Image (spheres, rainbow, N blue to C red):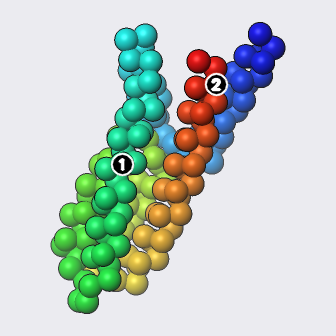
């Protein structure tokens, strides 16, 4: 029982830090509200799908950024998809960086796109790591 209380406190702390550090927004809370006894792993499943699908988009964007000249319309389209997926799980920092990337596409600013994409990839990976740890603790509470 004591262990379960420790896990519950750890989980609450991990979750709160995701919001405090600006990684997640209210969309994540809305996802949590959709989870129930019929779908006890709903949030984890949605997040897992997001990372599976978005990993392909990251690769596609990386390849498009290697081309010369850059096709800003294609890049914007790929990032539009990526942003939509990130928004659906409440990935606040990643969504903001996606918006910035799209603005650089509109302005034809390749350097801005490259810099923003590096930040986006870093925050994307950080959120993924933190969410995986969060779901692992959740699993331990089982």
Disc 2 to disc 1: CB gap under 8 Å: no
Residue 65's x, y, as percent?
32, 79
Residue at 38 percent of width and 76 percent of height = 113
Q: Does residue 95 appear in this view?
A: yes
Q: Residues within 10 Å of mark 1 (few under 14, many from 20)?
A: few
The residue singled out by tag 1 in the image is: 52
The quadrant the C terminus occupies is top right
Residue at the farthest bottom position: 68
Residue at 43 percent of width and 29 percent of height = 43
Q: Is residue 92 left or right of residue 72?
A: right
* Of the pair 110 and 129, the residue shown nearer to us: 129
Q: Does residue 89 appear in this view?
A: no
How far apart marks 2 and 1 lie (CA) works out to: 23 Å
The quadrant the N terminus occupies is top right
Q: Residues within 10 Å of mark 2 (few under 14, many from 20)?
A: few
**6 is higher (above) or lower (below) than 37:** below
Residue 98's x, y, as percent?
37, 61
Residue 86's x, y, as percent?
38, 48
* Helix, strand or loop for disc 2: helix
Residue at 46 percent of width and 77 percent of height = 115
* Of the pair 4 and 18, the residue shown nearer to us: 4
Precedes in sequence: disc 2 or disc 1? 1
**15 is higher (above) or lower (below) than 91:** above
Q: Is residue 101 left or right of residue 106?
A: right
Residue 59's x, y, as percent?
34, 66
* Helix, strand or loop for disc 1: helix
**127 is higher (above) or lower (below) than 115:** above
Residue at 69 percent of width and 21 percent of height = 8
Instruction: Give the numbered dot on residue 140.
Output: 2
* Of the pair 140 and 112, the residue shown nearer to us: 140
Instruction: Give the numbered dot on residue 73.
Output: none
Quadrant location of residue 18? top right
């Amino acid at each position: 029982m004591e262990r379960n209380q420790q896990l519950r406190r750890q989980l609450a702390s991990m979750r709160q830090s995701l919001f405090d550090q600006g990684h997640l927004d209210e969309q994540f809370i809305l996802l949590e509200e959709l989870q129930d006894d019929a779908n006890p792993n709903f949030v984890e499943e949605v997040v897992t799908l997001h990372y599976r699908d978005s990993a392909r988009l990251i690769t596609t964007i990386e390849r498009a950024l290697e081309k010369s000249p850059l096709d800003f319309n294609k890049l914007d389209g790929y990032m539009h998809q990526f942003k939509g997926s990130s928004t659906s799980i409440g990935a606040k920092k990643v969504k903001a960086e996606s918006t910035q990337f799209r603005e650089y596409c509109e302005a034809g600013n390749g350097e801005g796109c490259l810099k923003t994409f590096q930040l986006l990839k870093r925050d994307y990976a950080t959120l993924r790591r933190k969410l995986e740890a969060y779901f692992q603790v959740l699993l331990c509470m089982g």
